[in-house]
Amino acid sequence: MNAINAAAVAAEWSIRMADGSFAILAPESSLVTRISLSIKSFFKNLMLVFCRFLEKSWNIGMNEPRKVIHCIKVGIALSVVSLFYYMKPLYEGVGGTAMWAVLTVVVVFEYTVGATLYKCLNRATGTFLAGFFAIGIHWIANQSGKRFEPIIMGTSIFILGSAATFSRFIPAVKARFDYGAMIFILTFTLVSISGYRVKNLLNMAHERVSTIIIGASLCVITSILIFPIWAGEELHKLVISNLEKQADSLECCVAEYFSDSEDTTTNTKKMLAFKCVLNSKASEETMANFARWEPAHGNFNFQHPWKYYLKISASMRSCACCIEALTSCINQKNQASEFVRKQLTNTCQQVSSSTAEILKELAINMKTMRKSSRIDILVQEKNSTIQELETQLKQASGLLIVPKGAKNEKDEEKSVVRTSNVIPMVEIIPAATFASLVIEIATRIEGVVDAVEELSKMAKFKIEAAEKMKQSKSVIKIIN
Amino acid sequence: MNAINAAAVAAEWSIRMADGSFAILAPESSLVTRISLSIKSFFKNLMLVFCRFLEKSWNIGMNEPRKVIHCIKVGIALSVVSLFYYMKPLYEGVGGTAMWAVLTVVVVFEYTVGATLYKCLNRATGTFLAGFFAIGIHWIANQSGKRFEPIIMGTSIFILGSAATFSRFIPAVKARFDYGAMIFILTFTLVSISGYRVKNLLNMAHERVSTIIIGASLCVITSILIFPIWAGEELHKLVISNLEKQADSLECCVAEYFSDSEDTTTNTKKMLAFKCVLNSKASEETMANFARWEPAHGNFNFQHPWKYYLKISASMRSCACCIEALTSCINQKNQASEFVRKQLTNTCQQVSSSTAEILKELAINMKTMRKSSRIDILVQEKNSTIQELETQLKQASGLLIVPKGAKNEKDEEKSVVRTSNVIPMVEIIPAATFASLVIEIATRIEGVVDAVEELSKMAKFKIEAAEKMKQSKSVIKIIN
């Protein structure tokens, strides 16, 4: 009754529907109210989008506080460099070209130390080389008279600009000097054409180079001294975490295949962790490129063999591809005979867990930068589990479709059929395929082991006591 | 004797060796000759490196003439923009800020039209927004007195600089406005601090914006009018070529597995073509990002659904992973029984060739941007070949290790053993694994078919006559 009373208070038109219910007729809104409503909803949506954006940003900041630190570092560098404008003595020192210092800070400051150094060194070298060329050509043009000057300068800009642009397509140059080539074109063009109008070219070049050096060194100092983020360390951590993820992924996939529950969603995230390995190629290459420029830091020397990390990743990706093929077996696990699956459970899980163990041990080796003797033992263990699985697959023939007549014969004892289970081939093949893929993964892991071995040699990992003893024994053997 | 005479002419020391031969003792070279020799060899090496570099560049230029064209385009744009310095009326029009036009051309001119447009629009928007903010804050700071001015300005630079840097970490911003955010920081800082020293701020801002617009439009015009290279078209071509490569790769792998020759090197290049599919993720994403900015060109509208190309590639990569697993079967093909391999040859090759046929048809569909009705037929064909292969795998049980006793029994006719070949399970498993992988690839191909189907819907591919008839028939059915 209350509802009816409340409705009676506001004067409204209502209509009785066919089913006896009442529908309230809203008065036709005027143009003004409609516009105001749509404006309101527009701003509401805008606020909603903005709030969602803020939420997303907040999450990024919470998950990766180092990104926030990087932003603060950029802010600090910018504020410091702007002092050149605010403080009179500094401003008079560098003059109007203080702009170049600001420009350098904005353009050069990158997330990792390696990237910042790469850009700084490229910028400095590019500017210097271009200035040198430009002043040289300017001198030549000057000697050849007022008439030819613009022609010589224009042609040189065309030729050197095109050539430097082309050099950026050459892979070796692109990897190391892409930014430098761009800066070369920029500076060369600017100095060349300025030379035509500016009288004191050398003075201008000197001012510009010195402000660029000020900006660049400010970036390098901020980047290295305040919570440095090293590209090399990031790469190192990424490869280690990928090793661990792959180990988890493999174990999870195999466990999932042999589990009885139909619910595959619980572990999906862990199972699909190997996708990170497949997807991290580009970022690893970038990091390795930048890591090259970094000075010694932490456990890494100046010329730490970063490119060997890429080899490790490449062999990990070739394993991850097989795991990807494995996942489709999981979706079809019901096609395989349950009996065979149960038979293979133990050995398959042994193979997968010994393989995962190797991956985890490799991750630990890389983390501690030591070479443990356990790897060899683990590889041997893995190989013996593989052999066991292979034997079991051979024995699986004992479970097979036997000609129906054979059962009642007296030769029954001779027959390979050891159990009363007679399973059609079709139900064995899926399980056998799964097992073969597991074996393939376990075999391909040796590529990863070799790659880490190579890295440990190049990076001179410390050898653990046990490993040392083994090596010295073999040396003694050779001597004897 | 001649040799001895010749030796006698030049005075040289020689020594008689234990075996009776003579060895000539070279005089110990002096420091000067040694230095000159090492300098010579240094320059020789330098020349060698330089020649090799030139050769490499020449090859790149020969293989991809469009890269050379791009370089010439950059040269042209630079030469044109430098006219602003060489021609007096132009120079007086824009004043000393002509530098910004040059800077814009160098920084903004990219290989593809999309990338150039992306940078131009980002640069223009970033500059405009930053100028707007900076002048606003400058006005506020001006109102609050000489004392607070540098403090307000400094704080605003710190906060906005940090915030804009942070926004670059947000994936949605990074994909579309990364460069714009950088330009925002750059311009905001420059205008803010210049405002402190430069009197006529608005005039400066106007000059700068107009020169940037001159530079940007010069880039866009050159980029679009002279042999344009469209990111979208490149992406389209790349996906098509990847479809073709994958088809070749699959056919080649299967043929290799069933061929008798031991020599796997002949077709290795074709066999491993699928690696292109695995490795092109990063470049495809970049191209799709740039393609978004491109106007309508060729067969592509302004809002061509570029992101659907990424879906096609993703499902192609999932197939390519299985092909990668397949390649390791090829190396172990000797472990499989030759008889079983021969038995499976035809059906396996049928599956692979019908799958390859689908891929090729999809490539043709994309090339012509038509939707052919053949795809459905091909998919049906493929499915029936898969079924055939599965039946054959079932029948393979007939080739199996049978209890030895069974052979001599009278129930022989009942037995599943149809041939006299009795093959151990171990030799069947590798071939069965191979066949299962081929089936898996053929199944996964449907993901690619669906993705292309989705693209064809979104991009409104033309429907071929036959397909149209089919569709109109089904419409008639629904109406009836």
Image: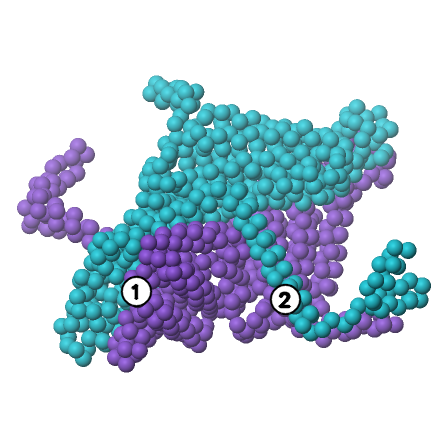
Chain colours: A purple, B cyan
Q: Tag 2: residue type?
A: Ile
Q: Which residue is mark 1?
A: A198
Which element is circle 2 on?
helix
Which element is circle 1 on?
loop
Q: Nearer the viewer, residue A134 or B121?
A: A134
Image quarter hosting the C terminus of chain B: top left
What subunit carries mark 2?
B
Residue at the image position 63 percent from the left and 60 percent from the top:
B44
**In this view, B268 is above or below B54:** above
Residue at the image position 42 percent from the left and 75 percent from the top:
A221
Percent x, y of residue B114: 37, 46
In the drawing, does residue A323 fall left or right of residue A436?
left
Percent x, y of residue A323: 59, 50
Is residue A470 visible to the viewer in this orientation of the structure?
no
Residue at the image position 60 percent from the left and 38 percent from the top:
B249
What subunit carries mark 1?
A
